[in-house]
Structures are given as structure tokens and as C-alpha cells.
Amino acid sequence: MLYHILYEFLYPLNHLWAPLRVLNVFQYITFRTAYASLTALLISLLLGPWLITRLREFQIGQQIREEGPKSHQKKAGTPTMGGVLIVVSIIVPTLLWANLRTRYVWLAVVATLAFGAIGFADDYIKIVRRRSLGLTPREKIGLQTLFSICIGIYLLYLTNTHLYETKLTVPFFKTFAPDLLVDSLFTSPFWFFGYLPFLFVIWMVIVGCSNTVNLTDGLDGLAIGCTLIASAALTALTYVTSNAILSDYLDLQYIRQAGELTIFCGSMVGASLGFLWYNAHPAEVFMGDVGSLALGGAIGTVAVIIKQELLLIFIGGVFVAEGLSVIIQVASFKLRGKRVFKMAPLHHHFELQGWSESKVIIRFWIASLILSLFSLSTLKLR
């Protein structure tokens, strides 16, 4: 059975020659995380030009909504579905550097591929039918719900192996950790209702994260820059949560075997940085739904595994604000017939306020960085 591919090939060599004992570093998560990130960066940078050329050859271009800011019309035809590059740049380094015996690694990989497949189908329909709408909202939410519930059911299965707990970690409170399973219902005829609070939280986090990243992906480099920052914060959180000493010191739930997810998060950091090279304003390629849904699904899945569902509100604060702006806008227009924002999602509101696209992007990055640093500081403020 495989450990991690590079370890299997290289580590046994340390017995052949004394200087090769340096290969012992392959045992350390920090070393493998750093090199997984670098591998993801290199894959993204090296494959980027080839992919962009192929997308242009197949005329896979972005359709732009007519009701958006007029400055965006010139982006029509820019190659899209570049998220395929992001997914490949995450998955390949993870398989090379992570412990493939760890169930959490496979769960994160499968979640990324599953949500990426939804985005791929959405992008494909847009391109084939030459319109800005792919899957219907019902179809998209339905598929996301199916995959997120499957993830929740598998995590419930892991509770039987003592690898996972259903208690909710609440920021700022050490002792308050409510259990999302309602034990009192398990002896009643309606025992299945006891699982609903847990599955609802899983659904809310993963589906919500996937869609809010998708909504944020409206300006060059905005979504991928915020994802880069959020992934870096999750890398630190995953390492701390999987370390028995650090998790005990910070009074966090210790998640056994979650340490290998640090490699997965490091791959997300490298993949995001590499894709940003080509997606920075003015973008040479867009990630499309295949990228945004995959990234959102991956971030949400990691958050529920390491029991930081509530802290994700701060880590992905920009994503949350973008999603809320759409909800508020729609609710206000239906209830009062008036709009709160000039346009939703929120980044378009600031554009119509007169901010340049690059100013909106950089200021949202700054906000994302501040919120991620704040989220890490809450580990001690408990």
C-alpha cells in the first residue's frame, strides 16, 4: 500500500549510502507541505501557457453579462475554464507528497473533483449554448447538496472509528462546544432527525463556501487572490489541529490524521499563486465555475474536517460578504421593490461607485488578509 509516492521511491535509498540519509526529511509534514506548494506552483506556471493556447484554439471564451459594468464587455472571449489548471495543480502535488493511506486526503481530493465536475458541466453548457447561464440554479444546488450530504455521511461514519467528532468549535469560547448530534432522538421512531443538525451544518458550510467563491469570481484575480490567503490560513490551522501538543495548548479539538491535509492546503496555496500569474489584471484566462466551485468545495471540506466551520466565516470573510450582498439585494428587491446596492455581488457595487477594477481587487485582498490574520488570532483569544 502506498505511503506517499515520492517517499516510496526515495526514502529506501537512505540505507544505501550515508549521505542519502538526508531523505529522512520526507517524513516531516512541514517539508512535504513546502514542496507540495512549490510543485503546485511549478505545474501551474509551466502548464498555464499551454492550456491558454488550447482554450483559445477551441474557442472556449467567456460570455459577459450585458447588465454588468460596461468596462467588462471588452473581456468577452477571454479563455475560460482555466480552473482545470487549478484542479490539476492541487491534485497532482497532493498525490505526490501526501500520505495516501489517510482518509481525509482522499475526502478532500474527491470533494475537489466532485465540485469541479459540477463547475465543468456548468461551463461546458455556457460555451456550447453561447450564453452566460449554464446549469439552472436548481440543478447546481441539487448536485452540490448531494455531494455535501455524502461528505457529511462519510464523516459520520468516521465517528465510529474515533477519527472524527461532531462537536462544534465556537470561536472565543473554550468550554462551549455543542454536539450537533441530538442523542435524545436516536431511541425514537424519528431517530434520523438526530443527524439533521450535523448534516445541515455540513451542507451550509460546503455549499455556501462553493457558491460564495463562485460569486466572488467576477474581477481579474479577485477570487484566486482571496483563495490564496484563505488557503494559507487553513494550512496553519490544519497543522495546529493535527498536532497533539499544539491543539492541547490552544484547547482545540485534536483531529488525528488530519495533518496530511496540510499538504493538500499547501497545494492550494501554490496552485492559487501560480494561477494568479495568468489571472492578474488584465487576465489572460478566467478560472470559470470549474475552478471557483472546486476551490470553494475544497475550502469548505477542509473546514468541516478540522472543525473550524464557524471560524471559516472570518477566514473567508470576503466570500461571505459577497454572498450576503446578493442575498440582501434579492430579498430587498422582492420585499420592498428597492435595491440596497447599485449592483450585486459587492465588488460590482464599488465599481459602479467609481473605484477602478484594480483598486477593488487590491482592497478586497487587504480585507481578506486582515480577516484571516484575525481568525488565527482567535485561537489564543478563547
Image (tube, rainbow, N blue to C red):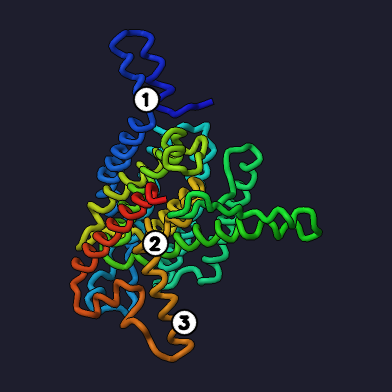
Of residues 133 and 52, the one drawn nearer to the viewer in this rendering: 133
Q: In the orientation shown, which residue stands out farthest toward the bottom? A: 337
| Residue 283, picture quadrant | bottom left
Q: Earlier in the sequence, mark 1 or mark 2?
A: 1
**Residue 26 circle label:** 1
For image coordinates 31% across by 34% down, the residue present is 35
For image coordinates 30% across by 52% down, the residue present is 373
- Measured Cα–Cα span from mark 1 to mark 2: 33 Å
The residue indicated by pointer 2 is 213
Whether residue 97 is visible to the viewer of this picture, yes or no, is yes
Q: How many marks?
A: 3
Q: Estimate the x, y position of residue 88 in percent, counting from the top left.
A: 38, 45
Mark 3 Cα shell of 10 Å, populated few (<14), some (14-19), many (≥20): some
Q: In the rendered structure, are the residues bearing label 1 and label 2 in contact, judged by CB atoms less than 8 Å apart?
A: no
The residue indicated by pointer 3 is 331
- Whether 217 is drawn above or below 175: the answer is below
- Whether 131 is drawn above or below 244: the answer is below
Of residues 243 and 158, the one drawn nearer to the viewer in this rendering: 243
For image coordinates 77% across by 60% down, the residue present is 190
Q: Estimate the x, y position of residue 156 in percent, counting from the top left.
A: 63, 47
- The quadrant of the rendering that contains the N terminus is top right
Q: Secondary structure at mark 2?
A: helix
Q: Secondary structure at mark 3?
A: helix
- Measured Cα–Cα span from mark 1 to mark 3: 52 Å
Q: Earlier in the sequence, mark 2 or mark 3?
A: 2
| Residue 58, picture quadrant | bottom left
- Whether 339 is drawn above or below 126: the answer is below
Mark 2 Cα shell of 10 Å, populated few (<14), some (14-19), many (≥20): many
Query: Label 3 is placed on what type of residue?
Result: Ala
